[in-house]
Amino acid sequence: MKERIPKIMLAVAVTGIAFAYGFASHRFEIFPYQLIRDGSLAYNALIELAHERPDLKNIDFWDDSGRTQPEYHALTSGAGSEYIFVLGNERAYVGDSGSEGYLAWIADRDGKIIHAWRNPGEIWHPLAGRDAVGDRWRSYPVGAELLANGDILVSYHGVGVFPSPMGLAKFDKDSNLLWKRNDYYHHWFSVGPDDEIYIPDLKLVTSPLQIGDHDKRITCDKVRLPYDAIAVLDRDGNEIREIDMLKVLVESDLAGLFSSNQEQPHVVETCDPMHLNDTQVLSQAMAEQYPGFTAGDLLVSFRTLNTIAVLDMTTERIKWQSGGPSHHQHSPRFIGGNRLLLFDNYGGRTSRGTSRILSVDVATREYQTVFPKEGRKLPDMPFMSDTAGHIDVSDAGDRILVSFTHQGLVWEIDVATGEVLWELVNTHPVDGRPARISVYTAKYVNNVRFPVNGGELSPVK
C-alpha cells in the first residue's frame, strides 16, 4: 500500500493540474481552447446543415384553391400593359416544357409566354469553396437583370451549404451559359450605364471581428463570420473593384448602427452583422430628381441594421441614411420626386399582414405607407413576406410591381391610391400537386428588341 501512495498522489496531482489548465484554457482562451471550440462549432454547423430541406426550397405551400397553373389577370382597368419578366426555377412551367423548367420568362398581362429561358440544372456542381453535408444541397435563383439583347444575369443562393451565396451567372437569350462566377455574390444587384454590375458580396473572417478603431467587436458562435462588401464587375464578370462595407460604415461614423446590450456594451453578438440585400445604381436621368445625389450613387439596404442608405461611390462614404420605421426591409428603389420606396417585411400591422410598402422623403425622412392603405380591402390574402420581397417601378413612377416572395404572388399596385391593379398567382404542378412557387424577382419590360421564342426552348448546345 505504501508503494502505491506516491502513484496515487502523482495521479491526483496530474489530474489537478489538468483540471486547472483546462479551466485556465477556457477562462483565458489559451491552447487548446481554440482547437476544441472550433471543432465543436464546426460539428454543430454541420448538424444544422443536415437538418435543412433542400428538396422543399421555393415550394411555399400546396395550393388547394383549384388552380393548376399560373394565373395572370387584371383586377381593374388601371392595370398597365407592359410585359412582365419573372424569375423562376426548376419547378416553373415544367408541365409546359417537357422535363425542363423555366429559369425565367417574359409574359404579357394575360399570361401568354413571349420568351423563356431554360432552367440550366445545377450549374454549381461540383461544389467548391463551401461546406455541405454530402450531396444534400441545391442552388436557387434570387436576383436577375434582363439586358437589351436578351442576355440575363442571375444571382444564386444555396440551401444546405455554408456560406449560402453561390455566385452570379450570365445566360444568352437562347439559355446558353456565357459565364459564371463562383464567388460569394448574392441577393439583388443592378447594372450601370456601361454594363458594370454592382452586387452584394461576402467576406469571411474568424470571429471576433473588431469594428474599426472602436471598443466594440462582432462575435459569432459559428467561428467563421461573414460580413458584407460590394463587388463591381465588368460585363464579362471580372471583378474590378470591391468596397468593404464595414469600413464604409465605420468611416461614415455609423458604427452605432451595430447594436449591443447593457450587459456587454462592447460586444455585438450576431453571425449576420449587416445583411446587405440590394444595390441599386442611380442613373443620370433619375439623379436630376434627387438634390444632393449624383449619378453612380448606390442605394443599399442593410436588413440586420433596419437601415437604407445612399453610398457615394467616389468617396466610399454614406451620404444619406434612414432607419427606424422599417424592420428587416428589402428592395429600396428610386421612384423620383425625391422619394424612395422599400419593401418593409415586419414593420406593418399584423392585422394587415405584417409587411408593407413604405415611401420615404429623402429631404425630410418622413415615411408614408403606400400599401396596404387603411380601409382598402386586400385581394385573396394578407400582405406578408417573412423574408425577401421585391419591388420594380414603372417608367412613370406611378405603378409598382411587388413580389411578396413566399406567397408566390406578384401584384401591380397604384402608388397614389394603393389599389391592386393586376396579379400573377404563381402556381405550378409539383409531383402531381399544385404548389405556390416563390417569386424572388418580377420586373417591367417595355421593349423586347431580340428574337423571341414564344416559350419554345431550343435544343441544348
Image (cartoon, rainbow, N blue to C red):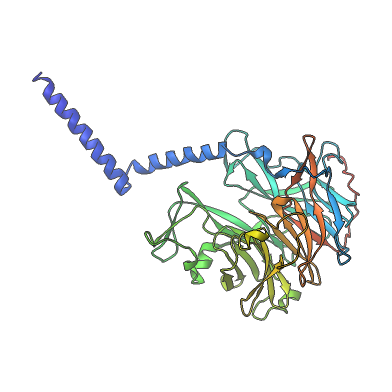
Q: Residue at x 44, y 51 (%)?
A: 207
**Residue 29 in the figure: left or right of residue 246:** left
Q: Is residue 142 visible?
A: no
Q: Name the residue nearer the viewer: 395 or 74.
A: 74
Relative horizontal placement of residue 108, taking residue 208 as reference (left or right): right
Q: Residue 11, relative to residue 216: is it above or below?
A: above
**In this picture, is 4 found above or below 429?**
above
Left or right of 209? Residue 426 is right
Image position of 258 (left or right of 289): left
For the C terminus, the quadrant is top right
286 up-or-down from 165: above or below: below
Residue toward you, 5 or 459: 5
Question: Is residue 267 visible in the rendered structure shown here?
Answer: yes
Figure check: 338 above or below 132: below
The image quarter in which residue 287 lies: bottom right
Q: How many marks?
A: 0
Which quadrant is home to the N terminus?
Answer: top left
Q: Residue 87: give x, y in percent of width and height.
A: 77, 51
Residue 132: % across, % down: 58, 38
Image coordinates of residue 4 in percent, x first then y, are 13, 21
Task: List x then y, in percent, for residue 296.
Answer: 68, 71
Q: In which quarter of the view is residue 293 placed?
A: bottom right
The single residue placed furthest to the left in the displayed view is 2
Q: Nearer the viewer, residue 419 or 255?
A: 419
